[in-house]
Image (cartoon, rainbow, N blue to C red):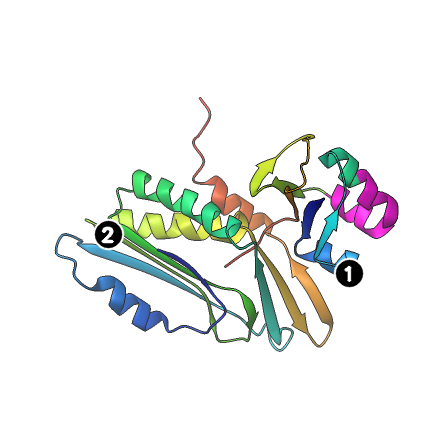
Amino acid sequence: MIILTGQAFDPGALLSEFCQDRTETGAIATFTGLARAEQGDTTTLELEAYPGFTEAAIGKIADEALRRFDLHDFHVVHRVGKIVPGEAIVFVATAASHRRAAFEACDFLMDYLKSRAPFWKKETGPAGARWIEPRAQDHADIARWETPKP
Amino acid sequence: MARVLLFGRLSDIAGWRERDIDSASLGALRDLLAGEDEGLAQALAAPGVQIALDQAIVRGDATLSARSEVAFLPPMSGG
């Protein structure tokens, strides 16, 4: 399931719900990303999505994760709109038979969300506002999952 | 009339987010936008800007119809 929401959410409640009614899933991995204050440099974050397009793009990569890691299920929740430091921006949960697949799928989905998913992120603080673009590290992270050329 | 959408820093630079613009092709639309706003012209030419036509990424030129939706997408960053 992929949810974009303008409302604050409770990652613990999402995890409890995701764990319910599973008798064959041996492993669930989750990642929760929180908005940072950057020592006072950031007072608000604003996240913009392209409704329809953003969900479809995440759906494609989630389908790839399902196949590649033999997942039983996944859940992605991503905030849009204004966010203050301390609030959760993103929650990813993956369910698989064994832990390695669950961990790796969660890592894979997050690397994608950081640098390829259609979101635009603006940080506002005392020095003004700036749009955030993927860092070199984010590009290096996602490159780890690309099939090596023969 | 194509519906034109700007995202992220592109809409801040242009001062608008959504407009209906009469244009026969993507190339003509780009030229028209660049001709009316030098700042937007530079931002659209920056590396990493992608174009979605009817919610699918396109490279190169394409014909536009009255119901086309064209979105200019600067480099993406989530999480």
* Disc number placed over residue A88 in the picture, else none: none
> For the N terminus of chain B, which image quadrant?
top right
Chain label for disc 2 = A
**Extent of the magenta region:** B31-46
Image position of A89 with respect to B36: above or below: below
* Disc number placed over residue B15 in the picture, else none: 1
Residue pictured at 45% horizontal, 36% vertical: A146
Crowd tier of the residue under label 1, counting other residues whose Cα lies within 10 Å: few below 14, some 14–19, many 20 or above: few
Foreground: A110 or A149?
Answer: A110
Image position of A19 with respect to A39: above or below: above
Amino acid type at circle 1 is Gly
**Res B70 → quadrant:** top right
Crowd tier of the residue under label 2, counting other residues whose Cα lies within 10 Å: few below 14, some 14–19, many 20 or above: some
Left or right of residue A32: residue A29: left
Residue pictured at 77% horizontal, 57% vertical: B13
Disc 1 from disc 2: Cα separation: 48 Å
A19 inside magenta stretch = no
Q: Which residue is mark 2?
A: A99
SS at mark 2 in the image: helix
Foreground: A56 or B1?
Answer: B1
SS assignment for the magenta stretch, majority = helix
Location of residue A131 in the rendering, given as x and y in whole percent from the top left corner = 67, 60
Left or right of residue A77: residue A23: left
Amino acid type at circle 2 is Arg
Residue pictured at 19% horizontal, 49% vertical: A97
Image position of B13 with respect to A13: above or below: above
